[in-house]
Image (spheres, grey):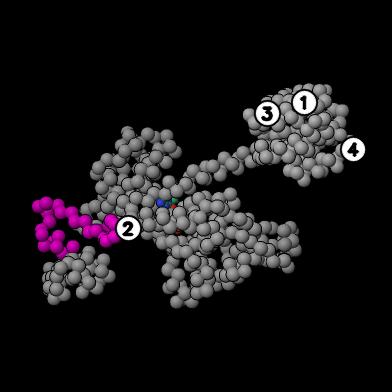
């Protein structure tokens, strides 16, 4: 990488030798003859790296270093020291210098230290680029929440993000955005500088889960040739996301519970309790209360996890989010496939809105991805949508949830369906929504229970 480097030394010969060496390697170098000149320059430019002589008249190297730490806290400082002043260099390291080099006649040691520092700088640049990308991808504004249900959730997410200690339990069908919301929580709270460690409990074989989670010490078992850090170590100061927690076996549930209670853990084969500080976000698409009743999930762990519960509604219950999610996917895949599709026509919008998405947002994204592969022109049209969407649109009634209550949409092909057929399908759909509770369905339809029964009998007879 090319770096900006400031060299400060009061000896002209050393200064020019250093400048020559560094310029040869294509870095941008500026040289200063005193600590005072350097400190002044830092008001206008902050370099990636500084080479700073320890012993200088006027402002000494150590004093200049202290000022550098304030004015350029992210720059790396390498101290230049003569034989006999190494003690000062050690002092400088305590004050935050990155390393030191003993000045020899040919300045040979400089290159090596410089290379190491540049490697670190390159790594830092990559990491900060990655974290900026993550910040952008998981900003609160990226979370589509046009529906009432998601607006309520968004308000909760804002609160929880700023409460970085509480454990969160995320519930919802597959593809509803549990992992996405976990990442949004991480990147928008005070743990965002720490790591986000995501683990799918079903992806790690049962017998390996414990060593993955806790890590192990050298010699813990045959083949443990060196210490291995576990996921708990790696999540320190950040977020541990355990997806599909409902699939964790009972033995591991007990061990996880202990970590949550005591906030410490022990590596396999280790004797020390290691304190950990991370936020746990657990997710599942299972009904944990049913699992508890069936004896496959520990109730005490459930209570530990359920400090804050976030329930992600299925997409069919937040119809207002469908088109914004489609537009987002359109832009995403447009970029990926180099296509300039910017609109969705009316008929296609209606089909997309009417579909029930059993696979939720992931299914929606797949539908748009597939359509974008084949789409020609600037507008997405219905012929690029899969058959299921066309088939579902042919049904007389479809149910979506708009706002609070379910909405039954009725479509009548004029001349092909009778009023009786329409009435039949509305009755059937209302009954289904009421979980086949006839009294409730009758009340919702404005009928007496007797009148509903009479109609149901007639439907039965006509079939
Ligand atoms: N509110 C949202 N706004 C924008 N994109 C979203 C939203 N929610 C989810 N997504 C996107 O939907 C996709 C599926 O989400 P995610 O993988 O988080 O679902 P999940 O519930 O964790 O699924 P699973 O249970 O199968 O692991 C992701 O690409 C995610 O970026």
Of tags 4 and 3, the one toward the viewer is: 3
Examine the structure image and report whether residue 304 is included in the region drawn in magenta: no
Residue bearing the label numbered 4: 84
Residue bearing the label numbered 2: 317
Residue shown at the point (44%, 72%) measured from the top left:
289
Residue shown at the point (54%, 57%) measured from the top left:
164
Q: Nearer the viewer, residue 330 or 5?
A: 5
Mark 3 or mark 2: whose residue is earlier in sequence: 3
Mark 2 or mark 1: whose residue is earlier in sequence: 1
Residue bearing the label numbered 1: 33
User: Magenta residues?
Assistant: 399-426
Left or right of 219? Residue 418 is left
Secondary structure, mark 1, is: loop
Q: CA distance from mark 2 to mark 1?
A: 69 Å
Residue bearing the label numbered 3: 41
Near mark 2 (Cα within 10 A), the count class, few <14, some 14-19 or many ≥20, is many
Where residue 160 appears, as percent x and y from the top left, is 48, 58
Looking at the image, is 143 positioned above or below residue 43?
below
């Amino acid at each position: 990488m090319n770096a900006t480097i400031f060299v400060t030394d009061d000896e002209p010969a050393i200064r020019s030798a250093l400048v020559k060496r560094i310029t040869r390697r294509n870095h941008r170098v500026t040289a200063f003859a005193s600590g005072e000149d350097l400190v002044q320059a830092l008001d206008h430019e902050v370099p990636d790296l500084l080479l700073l002589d320890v012993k200088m008249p006027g402002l000494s190297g150590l004093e200049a270093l202290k000022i550098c730490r304030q004015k350029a806290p992210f720059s790396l400082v390498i101290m230049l020291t003569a034989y006999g002043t190494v003690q000062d260099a050690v002092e400088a390291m305590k004050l935050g210098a990155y390393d030191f080099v003993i000045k020899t006649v040919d300045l040979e040691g400089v290159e090596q230290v410089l290379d190491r520092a540049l490697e670190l700088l390159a790594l830092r640049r990559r990491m900060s680029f990655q974290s900026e990308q993550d910040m952008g991808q998981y900003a609160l504004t990226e979370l589509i929440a046009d529906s009432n249900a998601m607006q309520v959730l968004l308000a909760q997410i804002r609160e929880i993000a700023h409460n970085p200690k509480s454990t969160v339990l995320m519930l919802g069908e597959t593809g509803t955005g549990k992992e996405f919301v976990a990442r949004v929580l991480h990147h928008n709270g005070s743990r965002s500088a720490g790591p986000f460690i995501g683990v799918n409990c079903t992806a790690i074989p049962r017998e390996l889960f414990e060593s993955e989670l806790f890590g192990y010490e050298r010699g813990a078992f045959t083949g443990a040739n060196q210490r291995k850090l576990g996921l708990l170590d790696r999540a320190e100061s950040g977020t541990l996301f355990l997806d599909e927690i409902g699939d964790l076996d009972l033995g591991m549930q007990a061990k996880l519970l202990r970590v949550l209670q005591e906030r410490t853990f022990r590596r396999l084969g280790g004797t020390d309790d290691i304190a950990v500080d991370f936020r746990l976000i657990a997710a599942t698409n299972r009904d944990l209360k049913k699992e508890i009743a069936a004896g496959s999930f520990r109730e005490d762990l459930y209570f530990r996890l359920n400090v804050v519960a976030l329930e992600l509604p299925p997409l069919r219950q937040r119809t207002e989010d469908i088109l914004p999610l489609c537009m987002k996917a359109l832009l995403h895949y447009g970029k990926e496939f180099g296509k300039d599709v910017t609109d969705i026509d009316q008929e296609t919008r209606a089909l997309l809105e009417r579909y029930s998405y059993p696979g939720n947002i992931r299914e929606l994204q797949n539908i748009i991805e597939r359509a974008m592969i084949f789409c020609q022109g600037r507008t997405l049209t219905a012929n690029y949508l899969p058959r299921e969407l066309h088939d579902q649109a042919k049904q007389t009634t479809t149910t979506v949830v708009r706002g609070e209550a379910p909405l039954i949409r009725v479509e009548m092909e004029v001349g092909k369906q009778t009023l009786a057929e329409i009435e039949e399908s509305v009755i059937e759909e209302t009954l289904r929504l009421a979980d086949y509770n006839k009294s409730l369905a009758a009340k919702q339809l404005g009928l007496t229970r007797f009148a509903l029964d009479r109609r149901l009998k007639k439907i039965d007879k006509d079939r």
